[in-house]
Image (cartoon, rainbow, N blue to C red):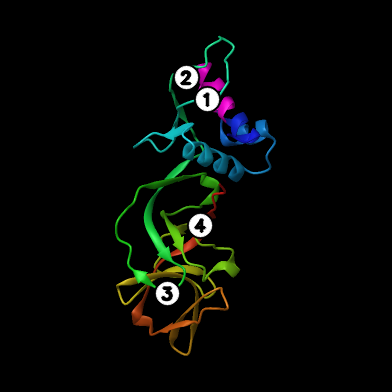
Amino acid sequence: MLTKKQRELLLLIHDRMQEGEIAPSFDEMRIALGLKSKSGIHRLITALVERGYLERLPNRARALEVKKLPDGYTADSGSANVTPSAATISAMESIPLYGRISAGSPIEAIRDENGSVDIPPSMIGSGDHYALEVDGDSMIKAGINDGDTVIIKKANQANDGDIVVALVDGEEVTLKRLKRADGKVILVPENDDYCDQIYSPEQVQIQGKLASLIRTYH
């Protein structure tokens, strides 16, 4: 069963497409549903995709397809059938998803692309970005929970205090807050149950900095 807002958004997109137009912009969706931010629209679209009402078209990151309508829905024409149509979502960006990253002890380096993530451009700035799924709880005091998706800006340098993706010894990768002291690189967790990880500078390669975060509620 859809929530009220999920139903409203699905029908808004469907009705606009039935009129032969593209889907409304994220701002138009936000205003129509009375939401304060576009991130709320992103969460609703994600939920509708997961429930099979919408589909993101392969190789077309900025397009959606309406797959079905809510049970019992009858259009003005008397038909509840849906002819799938592509709706261009102008406010979406597609970035590669590189699998899971440990927010505990370092894990084997992530090398393979595992699909993509569509996000509003307002969640990122300039530069190249990629997404990682968080595995572990060592960054919870920074608001990063197990199962979250972090958006990372590619970078090989970072300032003390930045939350970074760090490659250790060329084999393991982890998400931690960066600190330098006494000629050492310190990867600091945001959970009192974990200890700092201390390395020599040549052991650590910065692969990106935290830019944003996505959390899905089911």
Residue 60: x, y in percent?
37, 35
- What is the CA distance from the residue labelled 4 to the residue labelled 1? 29 Å
Residue sitting at x 46%, y 30% = 88
Mark 1 touching mark 2, by CB under 8 A? yes
Q: Is residue 123 magenta?
A: no
Density class for disc 4 (Cα within 10 Å; few <14, some 14-19, many ≥20) is: some
Residue 100: x, y in percent?
40, 60
Q: The residue under label 4 is which amino acid type?
A: Asp
- What is the CA distance from the residue labelled 1 to the residue labelled 2? 7 Å
Q: At numbered mark 2, what does the secondary structure look like: helix, strand or loop?
A: loop
Residue sitting at x 51%, y 52% = 124
Q: Quadrant of residue 4?
A: top right
State the residue position of label 1. Answer: 69
- What is the CA distance from the residue labelled 3 to the residue labelled 1? 44 Å
Q: Earlier in the sequence, mark 3 or mark 2?
A: 2
Mark 4 touching mark 1, by CB under 8 A? no
Density class for disc 1 (Cα within 10 Å; few <14, some 14-19, many ≥20) is: some
Part of the protein shown in magenta: 10-23
State the residue position of label 3. Answer: 105
Q: The residue under label 1 is which amino acid type?
A: Leu
- Magenta segment main secondary structure: helix
Q: Earlier in the sequence, mark 3 or mark 1?
A: 1
- Mark sitting on residue 82: 2
Residue sitting at x 45%, y 27% = 67
